[in-house]
Amino acid sequence: MLVGTLVNTCAVIAGALIGLLLGNILPERLRDTIMKGLGLCTIFIGITGMLESSNSLITIISVAIGAIIGELCDLDGYLNRFSGRLEKKFHANRQGGPSLGEGFTTATLVFCVGAMTVVGALNDGLMGNHEMLFTKSTLDFVSSIVFASSLGIGVMLSAAAVFIIEGGIACLASLISPVLQQNPTTIPEMTVVGSVLIMGLGMNMIGITKLKILNYVPAIFLPILLCLFM
């Protein structure tokens, strides 16, 4: 069940090690080009996952209601305020180079907050399907090289957060798997909604949009209820 999580964790560690060895060798222009390339790949992953929908109405309703829930709870704002306080604290304590805490915070937010993390871990726990987490591992591997080259060893420590968060979601999903599998359309529809958010994440990465993706995350879980009636 945790194969995908373990691979993702190891990918972050390996990428961070390479990034630490490279130091600041990678120029900013090359880092930007790499990240935008990863964004295009993320959009492709989202589009391919969206094609599995058997009832587009479930996707539309889930995203609409999920956005309302996320906006009312201000999930994106809460995270930004929390990370802002940490960043302010770490910047205040900096003496020259980036602090360990800054690298850990930045990398953890990138690797652990997003639709691909949630959907990938759900697929891992519900169906033993590691494909999405393997894909995410590739993206995180390249990203960790870029981050570690400029933010230091704190990026490597974020691997612990990846293991705890993804592993926790996968384990929880395995516990509720018998309930979800009573309706065979539930898991595919959850994957489709997650794929919509993944495409939005990719559009953010290449600079097309500035969507508050975290505010849409509740939408991933709404098909559990909607599939009972639709």
Image (cartoon, rainbow, N blue to C red):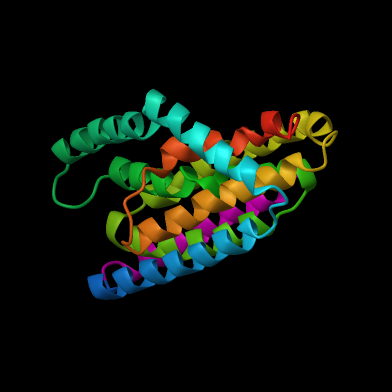
Q: Is residue 7 magenta?
A: yes
Please indicate whether residue 199 sits to the left or right of residue 146 in the image: right
Residue 208 versus residue 57: which sits nearer the camera? 57
**Which residue is at a point 57% across and 37% down the rendered structure image?**
62
Whole-percent x, y for residue 146 in the image: 36, 64
Can residue 120 be spotted in the picture? no
Query: In the displayed structure, would residue 105 be above or below residue 222?
Result: below
**Which residue is at a point 44% across and 51% down the rendered structure image?**
156
Whole-percent x, y for residue 40 in the image: 45, 69
**Which residue is at a point 28% across and 74% down the rendered structure image?**
25
Quadrant of image for the N terminus:
top right
Query: In the displayed structure, would residue 161 be above or below residue 140?
Result: above
**Which picture quadrant has residue 58?**
top right
Whole-percent x, y for residue 159 in the image: 50, 47
Decide whether the magenta segment is chiefly helix, strand or loop.
helix
Can residue 181 be spotted in the picture? yes
**Which picture quadrant has residue 137?**
bottom right
**Which picture quadrant has residue 57?**
top right
Q: What range of the chain is rendered magenta?
A: 1-24
Whole-percent x, y for residue 198 in the image: 51, 53
**Which residue is at a point 66% across and 36% down the rendered structure image?**
223
Residue at the top extreme, as displayed? 73
Quadrant of image for the C terminus:
top right
Residue 57 versus residue 194: which sits nearer the camera? 57
Please indicate whether residue 123 sits to the left or right of residue 211 in the image: right
Count of picture labels: 0
Q: Is residue 168 magenta?
A: no
